[in-house]
Every structure is written in structure tokens, then in C-alpha cells.
Amino acid sequence: MPAPSRSAPTLYIDSDADAQAFAESIRATRSIAVDTEGASFHRYVDRIYLLQLSTSSQHAIIDPLRVDPPHGLRELLQSPEVEVVFHDADYDLRLIQQDYGIRVTRIFDTRVAAQLLGVKAFGLAALLEAHFGVKLDKKHQRADWSMRPLTRDMLDYAAQDTKHLHALRDALLEQLQRKGRWSWAAEEFARLEGTRWETEDSETAFLRLKGARDLTRRELALLRELVAWRDRVARERDRSTFRVAGNDVLFELARSAPRTAEALGATKGLSRAILENETEAILVAIGRGLAVPEHELPRFPRGPRWDRDPDFDERVVRLKAVRDRVAAQLELDPGVLCGRERLESIARRRPDSVESLADVPELRRWQIELLGADFVEALRRAGTGGGGSATGRNGRGDATHGPAGNDDTTERGTAPRDAESSPYRDG
């Protein structure tokens, strides 16, 4: 398929007058492609530093440091009459809601569409090359978009993220309809509406760091103080937390608990600048962690208690076998078809009819239509027995996620999107 036409040059908009004029010129459009550039790899609190927009014939980049989105653009993004095309919408939607309070509706996500079609290389660069022979330059993938002035090279790079999205959307929509999977995509897109940042309890955030469960309670107390120190420094310097100290460094400090400047200086991963300016503060944080009384040491909250269920594992195995068989027939990644967490949630609830599968959190209608009858039969064959219930959204007490969910808590500021990592998870 030939490359889509680039019908007009990209406008760089950094004044209210130009922004208003652009919004007026596209007010009749019924489809707009959107992308954002943040700076989470560099800054403590991420925000939108570039807003890229394309209609079928016009392209613009708005500089949000100088211009607020005009009213006409806000109306377009919130209108149920206007389709808003993204690639990997989740993070863009969170930033748009956070910075502008806009709840985007009628979404088309080319990444989700590609995954539902069974495409294995579903990053934007891979999709554009596969469909149109367009090769995107990745050299600014981790650029600091908060810097000003931006080079022409950087602006040209950013513009590519929306210029071809309409043509890609058309190609993927045609394939979804041809394969009878458009209803699947429509349900996933509808679930993206209202995506926003969830408020995080900063007091317990250290417990969600990957690897925290391997620490003793005393080490957890040290980790809590070290995370608080790192967040303070990152916030004051407006730097991503991993650029102050990585998680691996904090875990090493929590385990070794150095008490002197010499011992601290021997810790790998602490920069010279941090040691020169923060040695005393780090040692004070370690001292606070060591001083916590035994009875006040942090602990992980208890998970939901389940009655003993000897048949649970068998039910999961049978459900997984159904899922894997259907996924192979459809040439889909099994985690896209139905992730492990949802299988476990079904196994816990043991629905005895297709209709009762609708009570399983996060299970989609299209998944029930495809798998429901076979799931119920698999559970019947596994036999019945004592089961339990508990407060929690799935069998392990974990939160379930939509298409863009992620179970691993990472360091703040390390969120540049990995174009090839799947938003669907499986175990």
C-alpha cells in the first residue's frame, strides 16, 4: 500500500491568535488525530509539552507552554460526533485530562486495533512501515520535550506521530470489519473514555515498588524513608526520580544501611552530585528508618482471605486451555484474548451460566460471546466444591486493568512508552 499523502505542511502554533485560527479552520472536521509529548523521562511531574493534531488535510503542533487549547479544540475532543484517533491512547488521555480537564470521547486507538487483529509488532513505527513503507526516525524517542527552543528536527519528528494516523485507522478499521472484530474494538475504545490518573497514597507508595516484598520489615522502614528523601529531591529539582537514584540503589541502601559518609560513598549508583549535596540527608533518612520501634515497623496489608479451594488451580488450567485453543484459532496473543487475572477471577466465581459471566469484573462482552459457553463447560467438567469469596477484584486481590493497565509500580518519571510492550498482560 502506498504511503498516505501529506497534504499540507505542519503548522507550529505558539500564539493564542494562531491557535484560535487553527481551531476555527478545523471546526467542521469529524475526525482528528492526536498525540502528546511529555517529559516523564526528565521531569518529576509530567505534563503536556507538545500537542500534535492532524485532520485528513491539516497538521499542527501547539506549544502548550505558550498556548492553552482554544475552546473550539476542546469542543472537538469532547464531541461524540468527532472521532479522535490515537496510537496507544492511555497515557495521552491521562495527560489531557490532567492538564486540561478534557474527557475525550469516541476514541479510535490504532494500537489496540492492531492487537485485536493479532499483529505482533504493534508499535507505531512498525505499523506504518508494514502498511505504507513509511520509516520513522526514532532518534528523538527520549528527547526532553520540555526544553525550549525546540529544533526543527525535533518538531518534524513529533509531527510524524499524527500525520499518518488517519490512513492507518482506515486500514485497520477495514481489517477489523473484514474479520468481524469491529465490535471488539468498539467496546475497548469505549472503555478508554474517562481514563485518568488515579490518586496514589504517597505514604504507602514504597510498598508498591517491585521487589519490596523481598525486604524485611526493618528494611521496609528504611526504604520508606529513602523513597521520601528521593521524592523530595526530585520534586525540588523537577527531575524524574530515577535520575536522583534508581530503585536498585534504594534497595541496596535499605539492605546495607550505611551509617557513614565513607560507607555511603561506596554504594554503586549514587552520582557524585548526589553524594556532594545529599549525603547528610541520606544518612539522616537511614537513621530515621533504623530508629523506628519494632512494633511500628511497616508491613504489607493483608490480602483477601479465601476459603481453602483445592480445585482452584484445576479450574484455572481448564480455563487457560480453552483460552489458548481459541487464541490459536483466531491467531491472537492469548493475553489479548483473555488475561490471566480474568481467568483467575472466573475460576474464583465459578459462574454456572454464560449470563452470570457478566458479573466478572472487567470481562468484556466480546470475550463472553467468544469464550463464555466453553468456559462454563470447562468449569462444569472441573467439578464443584467449596469456594470462597473475599473483598478484592480478582482471585489474588489485585486490581484488574483495562487494555492499558500495568501491574508493576515503577519509579516516577520513567514512563516513556515502550511501543512494543503489550497493554494486555498474561501469566
Image (tube, rainbow, N blue to C red):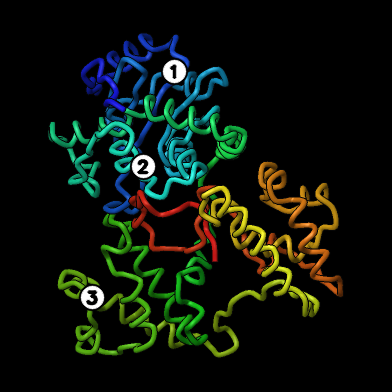
Which quadrant is home to the N terminus?
top left
- Local packing at callout 1 (Cα closer than 10 Å; few below 14, some 14-19, many 20+) is few
- Secondary structure, mark 1, is helix
Mark found first going from the N terminus, 2 or 3: 2
Residue 156 rendering spot, x and y as whole percentages: 19, 31
How much space separates mark 1 and mark 3, taking CA atoms? 47 Å
Residue 244 rendering spot, x and y as whole percentages: 27, 65
**Amino acid identity at mark 1:** His
In the rendered image, is residue 135 in sight? yes
- Local packing at callout 3 (Cα closer than 10 Å; few below 14, some 14-19, many 20+) is some
Q: Are marks 2 and 3 in contact (CB under 8 Å)?
A: no
Which residue position is annotated with label 2? 47
> Could you say which quadrant of the image residue 127 lies in?
top left
In the image, is 144 to the left or to the right of 88? left
Mark found first going from the N terminus, 2 or 1: 2
- Local packing at callout 2 (Cα closer than 10 Å; few below 14, some 14-19, many 20+) is many
**Amino acid identity at mark 3:** Gly
Which quadrant is home to the C terminus?
bottom right
Q: Which mark is residue 269?
A: 3
Which residue position is annotated with label 1? 71
Mark found first going from the N terminus, 1 or 3: 1
- Secondary structure, mark 3, is loop
> Could you say which quadrant of the image residue 396 lies in?
bottom right
Residue 371 rendering spot, x and y as whole percentages: 70, 51
